[in-house]
Amino acid sequence: MKRALSLICVAAMAVAAVSQTLEQCQQAAERNYPLIARYGLIEKTTELTVESIANVWLPQVSASAQATVQTDVPEFPDAMRNAYSQMGVDMKGLRRDQYRIGVDVQQLVYDGGASANRREVARQQGQLQAAQTTVDVYQVRQRVNDMYFALLLVEEQIALNNDLQEQLAASEKKLQSMYRHGTAAECDYQNVRAERLNAVQQMTTLNSQRQALRRMLATFCGIEITSLTKPAATPVAATAVSRPELDAIDAQLRLIDERQKAVDIALKPQVGFFAQAFYGYPGFDMFHDMMSRNWTLNALVGARVTWNIGGLYNRKTDLAKLQLEREWAENSRDLFLFNNNLEQVQLNESIDRYNRLLQQDDEIIALRASIRHAAESKLAHGIIDANDLVREVTAENAARIQRSIHEIEMLKEIYNLKFVTNN
């Protein structure tokens, strides 16, 4: 039982100690970024808009009630009314107060494709909003890159500081022994000890910086940051740029296409049926209502063709405006690609420069390590003092720190290039 519990604890510690890669942090940050919720809002809004537009094909029913008083109503001529009166027929005429309670029904059967176009415009607007949101979300990767590589650099400096402390501790122990045996001065021992304590103090600052960067990255990504995996320095292939900004421009052009179709559709006629029924006075039979002032039920059905030629007035202007919007979008694409290409050139030059610096760093470190080993030997034989040794130890450590900075900066530029090209 104890063995099983031990295995479980070891496994849990192993899971907790899994390093986060840059890609994992980027994906976690995108999921955690509050802007991600807009995708769902855009989708729901688009669905409701399309559904609302589709309702145009449902029967449009309206109910109304009215009561009016007129200054005058149709009447029979006096001669005709007297003739009817002699025959015993009382022609009362229409009352000036009139009433109506009715229902109107209209059914569209052909709209020239207007509703279908409106639905497609709504969909394209939703796609454009989603594409613009993707542009904003994509910027999250750059912020993750900055924090990730800053944390990597601090961790590299911590590792080098540990190596420095180990070297100084070894020299301190050796000098302490030499001092006890009278072969080294006390000030040499104290000098090395002070330098080691200085390295310990630097470690305190570095640990504080690492803790702050971890908290920032963890908060931004919404995950616990235990340790980071140094990305591989894989070269970026020269392929076409596939940034979300270009997708947003494509979505904008598709929306302009649909709006251009709407200009043509506006010139097409619309066909529909209608029906009307009402209960009131007077009705459609005016002669009957002149003799009887009772309310009656009345109804009619018909077909209607409407053709609004007002779209011809602004057609040329509307098409010209849409063409300008299209040219503006195309110009935005050219401008983005131009600036993007400049960024690629700059980043590639920077990567090449860091590659050359790293080769020089390796040579410098090898020389500094050789000089430090020689200084340790000279100190042991009393040829130099502790100051000379400390100087060589710190010079080697500075060279290693410089190499770490160059390496991390090169990795950052490589992944900035991946960000620029989205490859």
Image: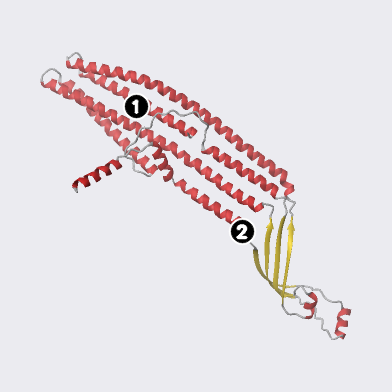
Question: Callout 2, which amino acid?
Answer: Asn
Q: Along the horizontal axis of the image, is 132 left or right of 34?
A: right
Residue density around tag 2, few if under 14, some if 14–19, many if 20 or more, within 10 Å: few
Q: Earlier in the sequence, mark 2 or mark 1?
A: 2
For the point 29% across and 18% down, the residue is: 368
2 or 1: mark nearer the eye:
2
Foreground residue, 285 or 3? Answer: 3
Q: Along the horizontal axis of the image, is 237 left or right of 111?
A: left
The residue most toward the top is 383
Residue density around tag 1, few if under 14, some if 14–19, many if 20 or more, within 10 Å: many
Q: Along the horizontal axis of the image, is 177 left or right of 256?
A: left
Residue denoted by label 1: 404
What's the CA distance linking mark 2 and mark 1? 65 Å
Residue denoted by label 2: 55
For the point 74% across and 57% down, the residue is: 306
- Residue 193 is drawn in which quadrant? top left
How many dots with numbers? 2
Q: Position of residue 243 (x, y in %)?
A: 51, 36
Q: Along the horizontal axis of the image, is 215 left or right of 375?
A: right
